[in-house]
Amino acid sequence: MPKAEYSLPRHVAIIMDGNGRWAKQHRLAIALGHRKGVETLREIVRYSSDAGIEVLSLYAFSTENWKRSQTEVAALMTLILEFFRTEIDELDEKEVSIRILGNIDALPAAQHQAVNAAQMRTADNKGLQLNIALNYGSRDEILQATIALAHQVASGHIRPDEISSEMFENELYTKGQPDVDLLIRTSGELRLSNFLLYQNAYAEMMFPQPLWPDFTVDLYKSALKSFQQRERRYGGRTT
Ligand code: IPE
Ligand code: IPE
Ligand code: MG
C-alpha cells in the first residue's frame, strides 16, 4: 500500500468507546460488542502500520474498568488473550513493536504471560510502535513517576531542583515516544477518561459520533486528513 500522501501525525491515540452501546443497539450480549470492536481494532492497526504512523496508542482497558460485572471483565480478558494469540505472527511480520501501557502485574496469569511474550518478541521491531493500554490509568502513571523520582531524591542520587521534564517523561510508560498529536474518541463522548493526561497536553482532539464497532478505515483516513487542516500553535502565534 502506498504511504499516505499527506503528512501524518507521529502519534495517534484512540479511546475505543461504544462497544456496549453497539451491542445494545443490535440486541446482542455485551461480549459480542467487544468482539466486534476487536475487528475494528485489527483494521485500524493494519492501516496505521501500512500508512507509516510512528506510534498508535489504543485504550483497551482502564484501571476503572474493573468496576464492570465479572462476566464483562472475563469476556474482555478472553478477547485480550485471543488477540495476542491470533495476531502476534502478523504483527511481528509487519515489524510492529508492542508496548503495554499499564500495570500488567494485576492481570490474570495467562494474559500477563501472553502480553509479556508479545512485548519481548517484538521489542526490536522497527515498524509501528503499538501501545496497548491495559489496566492503564493516567493518574496512576503520573503518581508512579513521582514516586520513582522521589526515591531517586531520597537516595541522594539527584537533588529536587535537578528534576527535569525529560527525567519525568522517562518514568512514564511512553518513555522515548513523542507526545500525542491526534486523539480520537469514538461514540461522541467528550472526555479523556484518565487516558494519557500528560502526553495529550497539546494533542488535537476529535470526537467522531460512530460507535467503535462501526468505526472504519475510511473514517480514520478522514480524521487523519482533517488533522492536516488544524493549525497547531502551542501557545505561540502563527501570523
Ligand atoms: C469501550 O466500549 C471498550 C472498553 C471500555 C473496554 P464500552 O464498553 O465502554 O462501550 P459503551 O461506552 O458502554 O457503549
Ligand atoms: C474509556 O472508556 C476506557 C476504554 C475505552 C478502554 P469508558 O467507557 O470506560 O469511559 P467512561 O466510563 O465513559 O468515562
Ligand atoms: Mg464506554
Image (cartoon, rainbow, N blue to C red):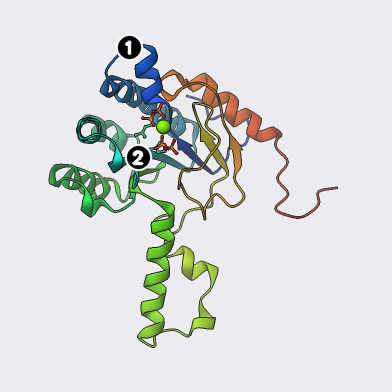
Badge number at residue 75: none
Q: Type of residue at label 2?
A: Glu
* Horizontal side, residue 48 vs residue 114: left or right: right
> What's the CA distance linking mark 2 and mark 1?
38 Å
Residue with the most extreme bottom position: 156
Residue 32 appears in the picture as rendered = yes
Which residue is located at x 71 percent, y 33 percent? 229
Q: Residue 118's spot in the image, x, y percent? A: 24, 44
Which residue is located at x 32 percent, y 11 percent? 27
Residue with the most extreme left position: 109
Q: Which residue is mark 1?
A: 27
* Horizontal side, residue 73 vs residue 231: left or right: left
Q: Residue 159's spot in the image, x, y percent? A: 48, 85
Residue 171 appears in the picture as rendered = no
The residue nearer to you, when weighing 57 against 10, is 57
Q: Which residue is mark 2?
A: 95
Q: Quadrant of residue 84?
A: top left
Which residue is located at x 51 percent, y 76 percent? 163
Q: Type of residue at label 1?
A: Arg
Q: Residue 145's spot in the image, x, y percent? A: 41, 66
Circle 2: is it few (<14), some (14-19), or many (20+) Cα within 10 Å?
some
Q: Quadrant of residue 151?
A: bottom left
Which residue is located at x 64 percent, y 34 percent? 227
